[in-house]
Image (tube, helix red, strand yellow):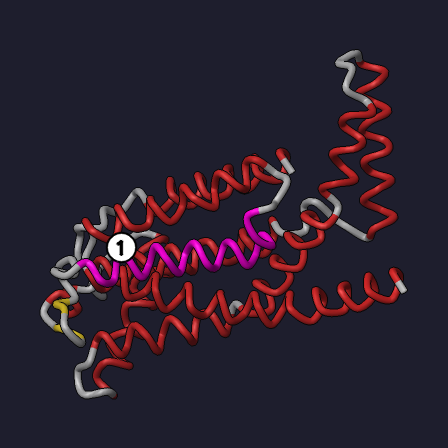
Amino acid sequence: MRKKLGITFALVSLMVLLSGCSSTKTPITPESTGFWDEYFVYPLSWVITQFAEMMGNNYGLSIVVVTILIRLALLPLMIQQTRSSKAMQNIQPELQKLREKYSSKDATTQQKLQQETMQLFQSQGVNPLAGCLPLLIQMPILLGFYHAIMRTQEIKNHSFLWFDLGVHDPYYILPVVAGLTTFLQQKIMMGGTDNPNPQMKMLLYIMPVMIVVFAINFPAALSLYWVIGNLFMIVQTYFITAPKKNKKNEIDRGAKK
């Protein structure tokens, strides 16, 4: 788990470094240069603009539609990542027992721990790195969409529902909803607040707070993107994990009988 988190952090850092070459305050145009702007940000900005024009210059509705379309396109990768995360969570009790069994820090004991850990992964059909490739593919697209929303000038001049897309929600409704949906989405994915991994439990509460803080200070267009993306992920995660959870409960009930 720690190794996977380290790889995930490295991938995220790489994409942030790549996108950091272009400031979010620099407008994106057809004349924008650089690999990041030309092949990620501008194409996504163009898609947002085209959908908005088809919908009567409704950029808010365009963000909703394009967010859903991107999530649908990434759905196979999301499913693989979600299943990988759930598989890792399911074997956490066994991993914890192995750590307690081989708690000594000497090299021989730690080598034995690694061997039995790999045997556990193989017996359960779990690949701890299986979620990294989907993340690597998703990250530039999602980060590029974030840049497209922040740097498309036309978005800043339009409103949607009760808020202007170019400034933060004056009533703070979107930031609160973004935080709540982030919490709910993570809770469903982690299997509730009783997850034995302390790092994941901490993330369950830290991430929603961070999202609320960012949403209060960023344009409402970005908050709208977060809310729609979270709602999609909640539905997606539920339909991926619910059948397996129900099947497991049926097996447990049958075993008790």
Q: Nearer the viewer, residue 78 or 51?
A: 78
Q: For the residue marked with disc 1, what is the amino acid?
A: Thr
**Quadrant housing the C terminus:** bottom right
Residue placed at 46% from the left, 54% from the top?
139
Secondary structure under the numbered disc 1 in the rendered image: loop
Front residue of 241/251: it is: 251
Q: Is residue 210 left or right of residue 78?
A: left
Residue furthest left as drawn: 157
* Mark 1 nearby-residue class (10 Å; few <14, some 14–19, many ≥20): few
Q: Which x, y percent locates residue 87?
A: 71, 53
What residue is shown at x 21% (from left), y 75% (from top)? 59
Check disc 1 and report the residue beneath it.
Answer: 33
Total count of labels: 1
Residue that protrudes farthest toward the top in the picture: 106
Q: Residue drawn at (82%, 65%), measured in percent from left and top?
A: 253
Q: Identify the image quadrant of residue 198.
A: top right
Quadrant assignment, res 239: bottom right
Q: Please, what is the dominant secondary structure of the magenta stretch?
A: helix
- Range of residues picked out in magenta: 172-193
Is 94 located above or below residue 183 in the figure?
A: above
**Residue 122 location in percent, x, y?**
85, 46
Identity of the residue drawn at 83% across and 51% down: 124
- Identify whether 113 is placed above or below 201: above
Percent of width and height locating residue 234: 49, 66
